[in-house]
Amino acid sequence: MAKVAVLMIDGYEESETMQIVDLLRRANVTCHTFRFQDDPFVLSMQGMYVRADKVFGPEVRAYDAIVVPGGRTAGAKLIANEDVLDMLRRFEEQGKLVCAMCSGTTVLEAAGVLAGKRVTGYTGYGERLLSAAEFVANEVAVLDGNTITSQGPATPYPFAFKIMEALGIDPAPFKERLLYTKAGGR
């Protein structure tokens, strides 16, 4: 069974994070949230406290994918954490999935894992993700090799579906149950 680590630090975007985790767990993916503090409750961008599953550390190395959600201040905090950047580089070197959306994409840029890749990100981030080979503004979620990027708060579903696909899980049944295609999801 695939294992996905989702990072949660003060200021993370809770709707992105919780929707991604929910969808992956529905697909029977072992999905854990990782915090950077002793207190299990992490303060979100909108002022909500959500309980994270585990403390970030070497255990993350055993996971198949790492996900960096957005959040206005969370991205800067993760960029300042050398252990996070090292973990992202380790995943990249091992060909494991490295995934980010919204401001999380700037964390991947800081770790140097977007070099030469086709990516997307939040509006205007084409100027921030300079190592990428191509910034694709008109796609909500992009998979290039072992890297998945997504635009922002309105894109957790297509982002999670791309992660499922990359893990070898067909997202079609989930899209059907959620009326995703009927509703015009991309």
Image: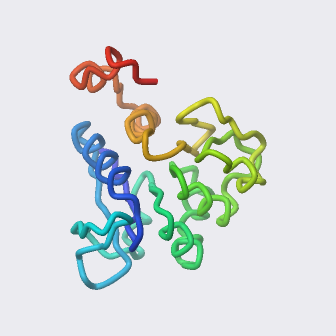
Q: Say which residue appears at 57% left-offset and 36% top-offset.
A: 143
Q: Position of residue 56 (x, y in %)?
A: 38, 74
* Most distant residue in the bottom direction: 38
Left/right placement of residue 159 relative to residue 170 reads: right
Q: Position of residue 161 (x, y in %)?
A: 40, 33
Classify 66 as above or below 181: below
Q: In this view of the protein, which residue sits in the foreground, 9 or 83?
A: 9
Q: Say which residue appears at 22% left-offset and 39% top-offset.
A: 26
Q: Position of residue 172 (x, y in %)?
A: 33, 20
Q: In this view of the protein, which residue sits in the foreground, 90 or 23?
A: 23
Q: In this view of the protein, which residue sits in the foreground, 32 or 177?
A: 177
Tell me the colour scheme of the image. rainbow
Number of labels in the image equals 0
* Most distant residue in the front direction: 46
Dividing the picture into quarters, in which one does residue 169 lie? top left
Left/right placement of residue 166 relative to residue 107 reads: left
Dividing the picture into quarters, in which one does residue 80 lie? bottom right
Q: Say which residue appears at 44% left-offset and 65% top-offset.
A: 61
Classify 109 as above or below 135: below
* Most distant residue in the top direction: 182
Q: Say which residue appears at 72% left-offset and 56% top-offset.
A: 128
Q: Position of residue 62 (x, y in %)?
A: 39, 62
Task: Please state, as top left, top right, bottom left or bottom right, where the N terminus lies in the image.
Answer: top left
